[in-house]
Amino acid sequence: MATYIVTGANRGIGVEYCRQLQARGDEAIAVCRQSSPELDAVGVRVETGVELTDPDAIAAFKTRLGNQPIDGLINNAGIVERVGLDDLDFESIRRQFEVNAIAPLRFTHALLSHLNPGSKVILMTSRMGSIADNTSGSSYGYRMSKVALSMAGKSLALDLKPQGIAVAILHPGLVQTRMTHFTPNGITPTTSVNNLLDRIDALTLDNSGTFWHANGDILPW
């Protein structure tokens, strides 16, 4: 049985990660600011009050974690705020950088002592963070923050390889969640997480640092 930490676990892809990890016999530790009835129904360990932009909140969680080794750290928490050229909101852009790019790096760094050879770090990014794939523009804060997250993931892959820790940079696909206003064009969280777990299970030191679509395609930077 492997132990995974999942951030942003109270809804959408996060709660589905917890559900599927538990169903296959792994332990999921759900990290969020506030739980939800959906997450509580899963029956995993829930750690609330963890604001990932707050170093003190992360330190308190680390204390509660004790000496628990972590096999998989899934940095799933994130926000999206639509910011176009005609309505640039620099506070929104800054906020998205804090949550989407800096917080996952901060959280991963804080928990490095809980990771061992064979552990895996997962960064949930987005195809919207692909520079080569940007054909529609806009969404400045979200796109820019996800590019930064992917760069952090690439550096982590190189820096953690000597310790035997692999890193995956994953795009979940277009998923029917609150973040996407439950778009009818998307796939379900169940399908997305099933594919994502396939990518995580296939992650090795040899393919560490790869930017994957959940369906297995390697995405352009």
Image (spheres, helix red, strand yellow):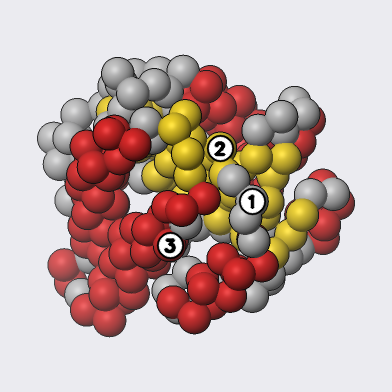
Measured as percent of width and height from the top left, residue 9 is found at 63, 54
Residue at (56% x, 27% y) in the render? 197
Q: Secondary structure under badge 3?
A: helix
Res. 100 image quadrant:
bottom left
Q: Is residue 134 visible to the viewer in this orientation of the structure?
A: no
Please tell me whether residue 51 is drawn above or below residue 24 in the rendered image. Answer: below
Left/right of residue 202 with respect to residue 142 in the rendered view: right
Q: Secondary structure at mark 1?
A: loop
Q: Which residue is mark 2?
A: 71
Observer-nearest of 128 and 45: 45
Residue under pointer 1: 68
Identify residue type, mark 3: Ala
Residue drawn at (71%, 29%), measured in percent from left and top?
1
Circle 2: element type: strand
- Locate residue 133, reporting x and y percent: 19, 35
Q: Are marks 2 and 3 in contact (CB under 8 Å)?
A: no
Residue at x 27% of width, y 34% of height: 162
Of labels 1 and 3, the one closer to you? 1
